[in-house]
Amino acid sequence: MIKARNYTAKLPAVAMLSGLVALAFGAAPAAHASSISFNSNADITVQACAYGRGAAAIAQAEAQAAAELAAFVKGPALLQLNEVADSLTTTSAAEATQWVQSLQEASQSGITVANLFVQSGQPWLQGSDTCVSMTLVRGTDVGGADALDGDIVWDDASREVAVVVNGEGWPNKAKGLSAQQVAEVDGLRRAVSQVVGVWLQQNYSQYSNSSIEQTNDEVNESLKDVVAQQLHTRSNGLVKRWQLLDTQMLSDGGVKLTLEAVVEKQELAQAAQDILTAIGSPRVRVMAPQPLADHLRLWLNQQGIEVSENASLLVNANADVRVSGNSARLHLGVQVEDAAGNLYGQWNNNPALLALPNKTGIHRDLLDVHLSHEQQRAALANALYEAFTQMVAQGGLIHEIAIARRYLSSTAELPGVLQTIGGVRDVQVGGNEQLVTAQLRYNGSAAELASVLSQVLPPLLAAPLPQARIDNAYKIKFL
């Protein structure tokens, strides 16, 4: 979300801003805008408010302000600018009109308006609401192509983006790869990584969890690496074509290549969106005693995280009230793991933060206070975010596959076939006389994986596979 302080940051694409609230905040409490105005320099300012206090309310108000700016630019901005033209003192009315027209034309044609800047002031309280002001600064260029990252030129009207990269490699005898082949793979990975970095720079705020604080002009390098790594493992279709520009020999039999790679933007954007959704808004199942379970489900929903009894990613939690004299303190622990027992992250509260007089129902009171305390809430949100990122970085959740042995003519080649699936990692195959089982990591859904299995398994089959059955969102059965 946008940090609650004075700053200047890049505004997300005006043509996409109207969906920002729904994408980033899901079912968060409604916000409402109060006013939009021009200042003497033709900057456009909006004030928006959201019910509540703290980071979540600030984020909701800022998201609403951004959406109001987008809607206003598409609508009456030019008319209202003309009404106040006489008050423009630091710029000509003609320049201001041209600027607003360029915003409207770009928005209506669907072209991303890059390099626009918003300024957000300190939030203030107004009754039971938290309010913010956001200003769209006049004067920045909205041309169709900009050099955004090194040699990358991002033309929003084009489906492709070209990037020149270097790749280095040395012979890999274990995999039977030459230095040239290793260098080519390295270069294509770097090409995808660079384009991912530019895409994240422009679009991160639209797909991030509302509890994660990150300004639009800062891209977390570790996040970029995770997304780029995952896209590279399933990069079919991302690099449309490439050509070799230069070759240099390195010591110890190595080679350095210079490549020009053309990356398909739409496929990359969709794949990156899927990965960011897995990190920012995954589907989880809560495993905790009452009343902690209800408190966590509500809290997770407020953070934009879907809670489902069929999810294979688990949030396990426990809460223990410890009494000393007449005071009670809460010891709260949360772990994120998958159904196979792999731990991705954990968090423990700070029991010393507060103590309440011991009484009936103190358990619920302490939970309410700790999960609403801004410091504790931010710490838990960041711990969950890091856990979700770790899960994606490791290759996704563990999926279990069970195939009745009678359908397979050969099992010896099964591990190799499964390894050929884009995005699959850590394949382990076992079973018994009746059943062949496999465990593997995959960042996509079980339904997506089941569809891919139906396409890659036929060469190993003795009989047609039945319809796949999916249990608990991660178990795929062909029985």
Image: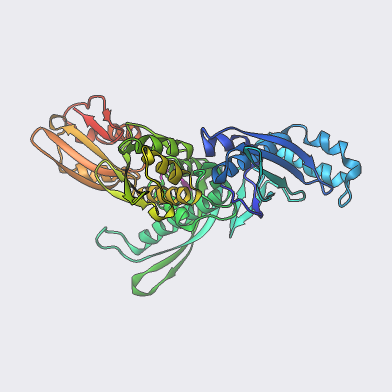
Q: Is residue 111 visible?
A: no
Task: Give, as a single range, the part of the protein colored magenta.
Answer: 236-240
Q: How many labels does the image show?
A: 0
The answer to which of 108 and 341 lies nearer the viewer is 341
The answer to which of 160 and 2 lies nearer the viewer is 2
Q: Residue furthest top?
A: 467
Q: Residue furthest bottom?
A: 251
Which percent across, then down, holds residue 359? 37, 41
- Give the quarter of the image for residue 362: top left
The answer to which of 331 and 112 lies nearer the viewer is 331
Which percent across, then down, holds residue 395? 34, 48
Q: Residue at x 29, y 43 (%)?
A: 338
Specify how the rendered protein is coloured: rainbow
Q: Residue furthest left?
A: 433
Quarter of the image that includes the C terminus: top left
Q: In this view, does 300 lie above or below 467?
A: below
Would residue 59 be found to the left or right of residue 419 on screen? right
Residue 188 among magenta residues: no
Q: Which residue is drawn at 88% across and 46% down?
A: 88
Which percent across, then down, holds residue 437? 18, 38
Q: Residue at x 51, y 34 (%)?
A: 26
Q: Residue furthest front?
A: 326
Which percent across, then down, holds residue 110? 65, 36
Would residue 308 be found to the left or right of residue 277 on screen? left
Q: Can residue 403 be seen in this view?
A: yes
Q: For the stretch drawn in magenta, what is the main secondary structure?
A: loop
The answer to which of 245 and 315 lies nearer the viewer is 315
